[in-house]
Image (spheres, coloured by chain):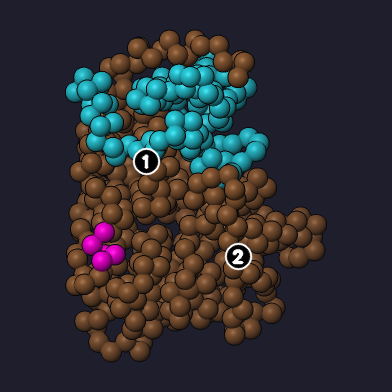
């Protein structure tokens, strides 16, 4: 009997059409380490997976009436996961300790993560695991140039798997692709698919530890010099995606930061592809790591200690067409502890207002 | 009903997690919890003032967002704040708006 984790991680396998998702999945499922894995596929693949828990999802997107874009919930995904959970609890199916979702080649990974967080049942039993994106070594570069979906998948992924390197003509192409991916998503693990290169652990290992550990590069921080996205000739969408760092020495006011980031994501969430960072909070010894994908922010992780002597906050953004300087100014104005403390008094009267009667 | 806005029932918004007294507790240390909520209200009000709105704590379990003309709405946490604020004020609350940034900078005494 396998121990069922309190929160079952749900990993997402994405990648552009024909980039080798199903092949990768088939190879992974042959690995005994992944025997206790439930698999959801939202297009019927040709590869036989009958002996595993395969459930089919139709690719329906449900847009709830109540508001913002982050409400895009995949109804069927939620139903399928609830069903799996229910069957597992009743012992109708073998206990599984992780779920892998293979999405269609054009899907935006974000709604899946959103579903896990917003569903009242799912969020108590499942948690988002890692997002693995496959990138085709042969066609990857041109897909990144041509299809915005491909770029978004690569920018959002926690781990990038380069497939089809065996049929790739030369090493020059491969290294160009790798450096392109490094610009797009500086801190994702980049793995080469092969017979031994991409084990289950590397792809679906403990992602929380990974996420915290990834924040620290040998030089102290995981993303010291994010390359600015170079303009690709004649391709408009790439001129817009850029990554940059906000670095401040002043302590940050957590509440002010929360107000600011929720405000930013509410208005510009779909254009903030990633936000990640390590924050020095006012009145707080240990650093806090934050990690967000579009509208979704993972619960902040408290790191054990500072990676180096330097105790300054670093926040990395990968944004799609937002004004970098404006964003930096905005951050300074809203989130620095000095600014927040300086005038906490004038509005204090508002708290007293008796608000019992609407 | 979304990842930020949460859904019906207990919601743990990401801004609720920080190792400060009063942030994690639900049943003990009531004073700390109220103090933390008051800080949150004050922080939100610094920004909301620019939109002629104010936030207040409601029974330590929710917040009430109100405009000067008295339109009000109850919200659960910071995640609900901005969609509601945009609805009530009828205009976008954009942290990248130059005028708003200038206002915050000025108020910050910077």
Q: In which quadrant is the C terminus of chain A drawn?
A: top right
Q: Chain of mark 1?
A: A
Tell me which numbered mark, 1 or 2, is placed earlier along the sequence.
2
Measured as percent of width and height from the top left, residue B66 is found at 50, 22
In magenta, the rendered stretch is A236-240
The secondary element bearing badge 1 is classed as helix
Tell if the residue under mark 1 belongs to the same chain as the one under mark 2: yes
Per the image, the residue denoted by label 1 is A264
Q: In the rendering, what colour is chain B?
A: cyan
Q: Could you tell me how far apart the alpha carbons at marks 1 and 2 are, in whole angstroms? A: 28 Å
Q: Is residue A219 magenta?
A: no
Q: Chain of mark 2?
A: A
Q: Nearer the viewer, residue A147 or A90?
A: A147
Residue B44 appears in the figure? yes
Q: Nearer the viewer, residue A47 or A106?
A: A106
The part of the image, by quadrant, that contains residue A85 is bottom right
């Amino acid at each position: 009997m396998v121990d069922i984790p309190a929160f079952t991680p749900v990993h997402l396998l994405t990648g552009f059409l024909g980039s080798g998702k199903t092949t990768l999945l088939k190879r992974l499922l042959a690995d005994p380490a992944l025997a206790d894995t439930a698999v959801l596929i939202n297009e019927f693949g040709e590869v036989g997976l009958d002996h595993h828990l395969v459930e089919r999802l139709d690719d329906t997107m449900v847009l709830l009436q109540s508001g913002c874009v982050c409400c895009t919930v995949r109804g069927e995904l939620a139903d399928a996961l609830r069903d799996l959970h229910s069957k597992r609890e009743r012992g109708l199916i073998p206990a599984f300790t992780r779920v892998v979702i293979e999405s269609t080649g054009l899907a935006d990974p974000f709604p899946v993560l959103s579903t896990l967080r917003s569903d009242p049942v799912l969020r108590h039993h499942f948690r988002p695991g890692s997002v693995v994106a496959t990138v085709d070594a042969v066609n990857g570069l041109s897909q990144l140039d041509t299809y915005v979906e491909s770029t978004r998948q690569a920018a959002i992924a926690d781990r990038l798997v380069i497939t089809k390197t065996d049929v790739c003509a030369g090493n020059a192409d491969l290294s160009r692709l790798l450096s392109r991916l490094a610009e797009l998503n500086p801190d994702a693990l980049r793995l080469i698919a092969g017979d031994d290169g991409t084990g289950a652990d590397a792809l679906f290992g403990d992602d929380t530890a990974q996420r915290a550990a990834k924040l620290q590069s040998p030089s102290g921080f995981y993303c010291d010099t994010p390359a600015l996205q170079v303009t690709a000739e004649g391709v408009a969408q790439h001129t817009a995606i850029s990554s940059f760092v906000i670095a401040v020495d002043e302590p940050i006011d957590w509440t002010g930061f929360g107000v600011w980031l929720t405000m930013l994501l509410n208005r510009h969430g779909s254009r903030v592809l990633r936000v990640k960072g390590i924050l020095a909070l006012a009145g707080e010894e240990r650093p806090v790591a934050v990690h967000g994908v579009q509208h979704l922010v993972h619960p902040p992780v408290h790191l054990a200690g500072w990676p180096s002597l330097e105790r300054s906050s670093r926040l990395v953004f990968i944004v799609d067409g937002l004004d970098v300087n404006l964003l930096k100014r905005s951050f300074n104005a809203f989130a620095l502890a000095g600014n927040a403390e300086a005038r906490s008094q004038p509005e204090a009267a508002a708290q007293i207002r008796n608000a019992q009667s609407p | 009903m979304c990842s930020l806005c949460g859904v019906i029932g207990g919601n743990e918004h990401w801004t609720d997690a920080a190792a400060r007294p009063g942030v994690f507790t639900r049943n003990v240390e009531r004073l700390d919890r109220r103090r933390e909520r008051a800080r949150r209200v004050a922080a939100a009000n610094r920004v909301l003032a620019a939109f002629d709105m104010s936030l207040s704590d409601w029974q330590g379990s929710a917040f009430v967002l109100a405009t000067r003309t008295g339109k009000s709405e109850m919200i659960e946490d910071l995640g609900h704040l901005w969609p509601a604020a945009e609805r009530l004020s009828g205009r976008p609350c954009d942290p990248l708006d130059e005028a708003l940034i200038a206002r915050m900078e000025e108020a910050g005494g910077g």
